[in-house]
Image (cartoon, coloured by chain):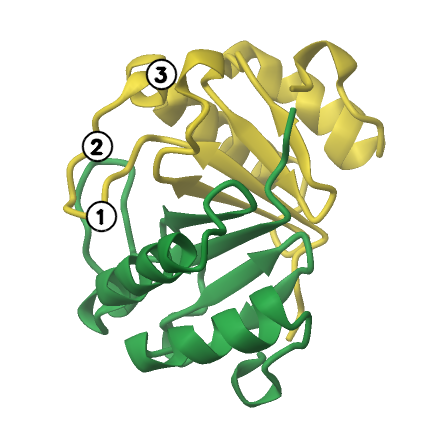
Chain colours: A yellow, B green
Amino acid sequence: MNKPKYHILVCTSSRVNGQQKGFCHTKASVDIINNFMEEIEDRGLGGKVMVSNTGCLALCEKGPVVVIYPDNIWYGGVTADDVDEIMNEHIEGGQVVKRLEL
Amino acid sequence: MNKPKYHILVCTSSRVNGQQKGFCHTKASVDIINNFMEEIEDRGLGGKVMVSNTGCLALCEKGPVVVIYPDNIWYGGVTADDVDEIMNEHIEGGQVVKRLEL
């Protein structure tokens, strides 16, 4: 299969029973995922970069949490305003955003 | 941070609006994630192996989809009965389960 070059996971506290509650969700993680989706489309990276919401990533006190695979880089305390920097530096530039890394 | 050795993603069709609808969800993906959680606990791998539910992974016709990171191995058509094999072969044995690989 044609795997994405980058798979961005955003904790949105989605529970398997359909509820969506938790720290990351209260901290506007849905805005984070929406911003990633917009940036991926605006930059024409739709086939190369994928973004997915996830259930709790068990680092609530460090949330909202974003993970970039297959690089295995975990970011914490991410805001919707940080999305542009992550796209520029990491996804397009190949550099870890050190100030957000867990 | 202490990253998990393996992060298992299971598509449960969780939507960011809190709904949980879609192909993988209808195909009992919640049973898949529950089986992974039980196997991780039974095998004492709680600190090393993490499992997360995700939103749609955009391969619905090949679902239910399970992804193992950071290996970047994508499995399709997974059933709850396949969990034991994935745990034995991949997570504990380090070998890709070829018959399920996408």
Residue type, mark 2 in image:
Gln
Q: Position of residue B67 (x, y in %)?
A: 53, 62
Relative height, residue B66 to residue A80 (above, below): below
**Callout 3, which amino acid?**
Ala
Please name the residue shown 58% across and 65% down the image: B91
Identify the residue at horizontal 38%, vertical 49% (top origin). Answer: B54
Q: Quadrant of residue A98?
A: top right
> Can residue A69 be seen?
yes
Q: Among all residues in the image, which is located at the extreme bottom? A: B99
**Tag in front: 1 or 3:** 1
- Disc 1 crowd rating (10 Å Cα; few below 14, some 14-19, many 20+) is many
CA distance separating discs 1 and 3: 20 Å
Mark 1, residue position: A16
Location of mark 2 (residue): A20
Horizontal placement of B48 versus A95: left or right?
Answer: left
The N terminus of chain B: image quadrant: top right
In this view, the residue in front, A27 or A55, is A55
Percent coordinates x, y for residue A11 in the rendering = 42, 31
Secondary structure beneath label 3: loop
Dot in front, 2 or 3: 2
Looking at the image, residue A26 lies above or below residue B92: above
Q: Earlier in the sequence, mark 2 or mark 3?
A: 2
Amino acid type, mark 1: Val
For the C terminus of chain B, the quadrant is bottom right
